[in-house]
Image: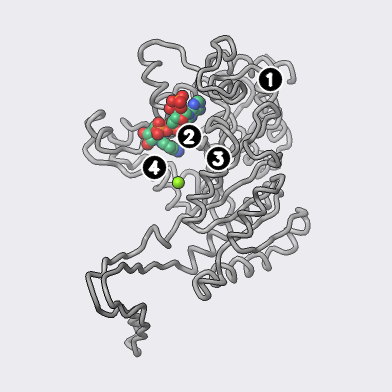
């Protein structure tokens, strides 16, 4: 074997559950370890380990990312009632992604992998459209009230310093109705804006932010102003990276996105991001080609696949059957982390390796060696012919062989 490329600083490796845990191990064994001499600080976030450590392991992994700056993560089970029963859990442990995101005060960006033979449903989309979703407040931390009949609803602010309260009338109800109180925080909006800028600068893509300040004259104007303040602080870096910032109304953005070729980061408020990220993901085609990255305001990152643990395929695997699950987004979770490590360490050979592995994966798909999810898209049927796709291990071997040839 040729000598392996030395990676200067550690990468935090976070293992997970089910089919993705299986694919994770294969990707590491065939595509990473033979080529990189890397110190992987390993955290096992399998549901069993989280139970055993009372979920302490999740927090430890988040702290490790904060320390080293780069983490790569496998998908993990977020327990519900059925999972508690299945694994005999002592508690319905919280979503690991939620815990890590809260610790790093980060924003999640979702981005599709583009291949020539996988056509987005929207003809104009040629480059990725990345969605950054604010993950705090608004409708997701709201107080609601069902108004039973005639009466007045007020909004009251009582300052902690004992000064005079402020009361605003929301509505004088003449009959039954419903009311909602929601909030956000300067600090959270600012972290969100900073994470979006950090990611746009890393990826060298234009940044769009959309809201509806014509209707929410104080609420959305607050978002708009904080974004502008952060952009103003980074003017020089943005110029150097050749990227621009554009604020526009959400309805206008939606209209523009459909006609746009992509290659932008679209920052969305919480609910807009929830809705639009599903639209963008479906518009591009497959979950198996969707990347996800968590970015903290100071540029620390955790990369992963956007999909879950692919339980349905894992049930087949448990029966000893071969599955045709797509490991592409998992490969890109590794390359995304490796690339960032190389950037931070200023080791171009490490960055180059990540790019070569990404190219090998895309070329494998473009040569027609695909897993069943992509065969469905290429043949435009839920049941593509059996000889139109290969199984997961064959796919990884095909990528490995291309990678060997290039290196
Ligand atoms: P999922 O794992 O994303 O899978 C849903 C379906 O999407 C699969 O059954 C499969 O469709 C298709 N799919 C997803 N990834 C694929 C891939 N790589 N290759 C081929 N097909 C793929 O979602 P889920 O089944 O709803 O959730 C399973 C578990 O994952 C849950 O316990 C959930 O808590 C967890 N989860 C974790 C994360 C995370 O850690 N980031 C995110 C979401 C969900 P077909 O069945 O049609 O083949
Ligand atoms: Mg959603």
Quadrant where the N terminus is found in the figure: top right
Q: Are marks 4 and 2 in contact (CB under 8 Å)?
A: no
Distance, label 2 to label 3, CA atoms, is 11 Å
Q: Which mark is residue 96?
A: 4
Q: CA distance from mark 3 to mark 4?
A: 22 Å
Residue 331 sits above or below residue 148 on the image:
above
Is the CB of mark 1 within 8 Å of ligand 1?
no
In this rendering, the label closer to the viewer, 4 or 2 = 2
The reply to whether discs 3 and 1 touch (Cβ–Cβ < 8 Å) is no
Dot 2 or dot 3, earlier in sequence: 3
At x 42% / y 11%, what residue is drawn?
321
User: Which tag, 4 or 2, sits closer to the chain's start?
Assistant: 4
Question: Judging from the image, what secondary structure is the residue with disc 4 in?
Answer: helix
Give how far across and how far down residue 206 sits, in percent.
70, 53
Q: Is mark 4 within 8 Å of ligand 1?
A: yes
The residue that disc 2 covers is: 307
Q: Secondary structure at mark 1?
A: helix
Residue underneath mark 1: 403
Residue beneath the point at 58% across and 55% down? 267
Up-down relation of residue 139 to residue 313 (above or below): below
**Residue 285 in the image, given as x and y percentages of width and height:** 58, 33
In what element is the residue under mark 3?
A: helix
Question: Image check: 296 left or right of 154?
Answer: right
Q: Which numbered dot is residue 281?
A: 3
């Amino acid at each position: 074997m040729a000598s392996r490329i030395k990676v200067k600083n550690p990468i935090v490796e976070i293992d997970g559950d089910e089919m993705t845990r299986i694919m994770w191990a294969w990707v590491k064994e065939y595509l990473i370890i033979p080529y990189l001499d890397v110190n992987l600080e390993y955290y096992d976030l399998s549901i069993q380990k989280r139970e055993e450590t009372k979920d302490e392991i999740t927090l430890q992994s988040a702290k490790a990312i904060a320390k080293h700056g780069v983490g790569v993560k496998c998908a993990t089970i977020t327990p519900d009632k059925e999972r508690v029963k299945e694994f005999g859990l002592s508690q319905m442990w919280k979503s690991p992604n939620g815990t890590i995101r809260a610790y790093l005060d980060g924003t999640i960006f979702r981005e599709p992998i583009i291949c020539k033979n996988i056509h987005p449903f929207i003809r104009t989309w040629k480059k990725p459209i990345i969605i950054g979703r604010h993950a705090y407040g608004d409708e997701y931390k709201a107080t609601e009230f069902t108004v039973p009949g005639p009466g007045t609803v007020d909004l009251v602010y009582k300052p902690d310093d004992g000064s005079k309260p402020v009361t605003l009338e929301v509505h004088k109800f003449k009959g039954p109705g419903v009311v909602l109180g929601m909030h956000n925080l300067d600090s959270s909006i600012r972290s969100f804006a900073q994470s979006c800028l950090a990611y746009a600068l890393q990826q060298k893509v234009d940044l769009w932010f959309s809201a509806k300040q014509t209707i929410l004259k104080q609420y959305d104007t607050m978002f708009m102003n904080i974004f502008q303040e952060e952009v103003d602080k980074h003017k020089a870096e943005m110029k150097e990276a050749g990227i621009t910032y554009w604020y526009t109304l959400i309805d206008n953005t939606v209209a523009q996105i459909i006609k746009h070729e992509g290659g932008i980061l679209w920052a969305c408020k919480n609910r807009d991001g929830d809705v639009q990220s599903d639209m963008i993901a479906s518009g591009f085609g497959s979950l198996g080609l969707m990347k996800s990255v968590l970015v903290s305001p100071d540029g620390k990152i955790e990369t992963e696949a956007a999909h879950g643990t692919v339980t349905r395929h894992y049930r087949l695997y448990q029966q000893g059957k071969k599955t045709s699950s797509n490991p592409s987004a998992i490969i890109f979770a590794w390359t995304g982390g490796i690339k960032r490590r190389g950037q931070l360490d200023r080791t171009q050979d490490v960055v180059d390796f990540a790019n070569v592995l990404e190219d090998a994966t895309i070329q494998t798909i473009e040569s027609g060696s695909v897993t069943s999810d992509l065969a469905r898209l290429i043949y435009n049927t839920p049941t593509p012919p059996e000889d139109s796709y290969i199984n997961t291990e064959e796919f990884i071997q095909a990528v490995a062989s291309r990678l060997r040839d290039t290196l």
